[in-house]
Amino acid sequence: MNALDLWDIHTGKRFPFDARAPRIDNGTGRPSPDRYVSAAFAAKEWEKVFAKSWLLAGPLSDIPEPGDFMKFDIGPESFIVVRDEDGSVKAHYNVCPHRGSQLVTADLGSVGQFTCPFHSWQFALDGTCTSVTDKETFRPEVLCHGTDLSSVRCEVAAGLVFLSMDPDIQPLEEFLAPILGQLELYEIDQMYVVQHRRSDWGSNWKGGVDAFAEIYHLHAVHPQTQCLMDDRTQIDLWPGGLSRQFVPFAQPSPRFPDQESVNPGIQMMLRDAGIDPETYQGSARETRTAVQQAKRKRSDELGLRYERFSDSQLSDSVVYSVFPNVQIGCHPEAVFLHRFIPHATDPNQFTYDTCILYRHVDAPGYSAPAWMGMGEEVDLSGRTRPDVIHTKLGEPPCLGEVLDQDSDLLPVVQKGARSRGFKGPLWSEQEGRLRHFHAELDRMMGA
């Protein structure tokens, strides 16, 4: 038996949502560290993995009306994702077929058509070329090579837009099938972005994936979390590199010495659930259950329909990995989207892109979880879409204490991975999502 199977983290009534997935054994191999440092590996990875996968371009709420577009950059490529006149969503390479100029440079915008800034060629939202400047000066045999934008597969699921450079890739809903129904419970399609930050980190993108796919490191890197997060966890794996992890909140880790006092971190989570810490009579070990019960009471009062969630979903973070480079942290009130974007040329750098999505409920005390770190200046109403804040390599990312600690540590890990003394990772069962991710990576690299 897997040692983690002994950690029964759920409380209260059992929901099918909480059930463990059938076990997948990815073996005990030790992969070579060149996957983290080799430019040749990165080049092959781009062609074998990224060019053949579904890639999360962004939330559907960013393009609500015809003409609304978002730019999605990853590795050496840039894409335009746009809402067409008929309401459908299209995706095109962000490049004019004439001389290769990029068509858009803004992260988000709204247009009636796309106009190349170089020679004013024009394109409909669906990518069709509608105007060639001085068309009469081109020989027909030149233009017959094609003047429309180059488009890619684009599909929507659970309120999220994905694209793929592979025209023959399996349908998105088939790929996401093991987790799609679970994601849909959170109604991400009704949420909108309230914070969007992007920062460049001195590590391989897989180092970012690895760090966010386990909580084994919390006691060492983020000891301040031990008073309000439990290290015991449930890990579920599905084919295609998909995985899930429950991270119990609102109770201290067994490593934390004080299991009784309602410390400031747990007080914050009590307030989130509408419980006054000053009048709360229970111990720290009982706050997770108290939070769950309080949220059910709030749901009954406000019609939030939390009966669709298990108790664990009400208190915990349920984190999904979507291969290759996405993590989705799900909570009834808000969702974290994390993307680990490979650098175009340097395997020792990546861009960490994180969004918080939220749906406003007009009720006293209802908000996104306070631990997400949004200040009073953040507009939770959805009336304004915040700008993307991008910090470059070497600048403090200002993502909050925990994420800033990760950004400081990962370059240290990356430097160690380049040492001839490092022979490759040795993963525990607590790092099962990492082994699962790398098994899928190796499968695609060998395809």
Image (cartoon, rainbow, N blue to C red):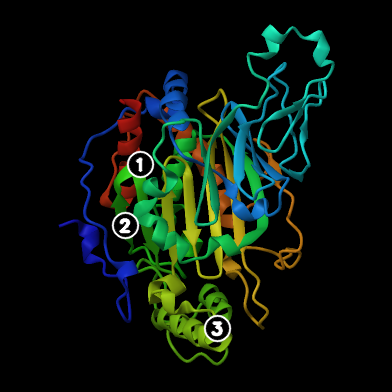
Amino acid type, callout 2: Ile
The amino acid beneath tag 3 is Gly
| Viewer-side label of 3, 1 | 3
Element type at mark 1? helix
Task: Name the residue tied to disc 3.
Answer: 303
Name the one closer to the observer, 121 or 374: 121
Taking the spot 30% from the left edge, 56% from the top edge, the residue there is 236
- The answer to whether residue 443 of the structure is visible from this angle is yes
Q: Which residue is mark 2?
A: 235
Q: CA distance from mark 2 to mark 3?
A: 31 Å
Kindly indicate the quadrant of the structure image that contains residue 374.
bottom right
Quick check: marks 3 and 1 in contact, CB under 8 Å?
no
Amino acid carrying label 1: it is: Phe
Question: What's the residue at 66%, 82% (across, down)?
Answer: 363
**SS of the residue at dot 3?**
loop
Residue underneath mark 1 = 437
What's the CA distance linking mark 3 and mark 1?
Answer: 38 Å
Q: Quadrant of residue 207?
A: top left
Q: Which mark is residue 415?
A: none
Residue 346 rendering spot, x and y as whole percentages: 55, 24
Q: Position of residue 353 (x, y in %)?
A: 59, 45
Q: Tell me residue 423's x, y (percent).
A: 31, 29
For the point 42% across and 21% down, the residue is: 44
Q: Earlier in the sequence, mark 3 or mark 1?
A: 3
Q: Is residue 250 visible?
A: no
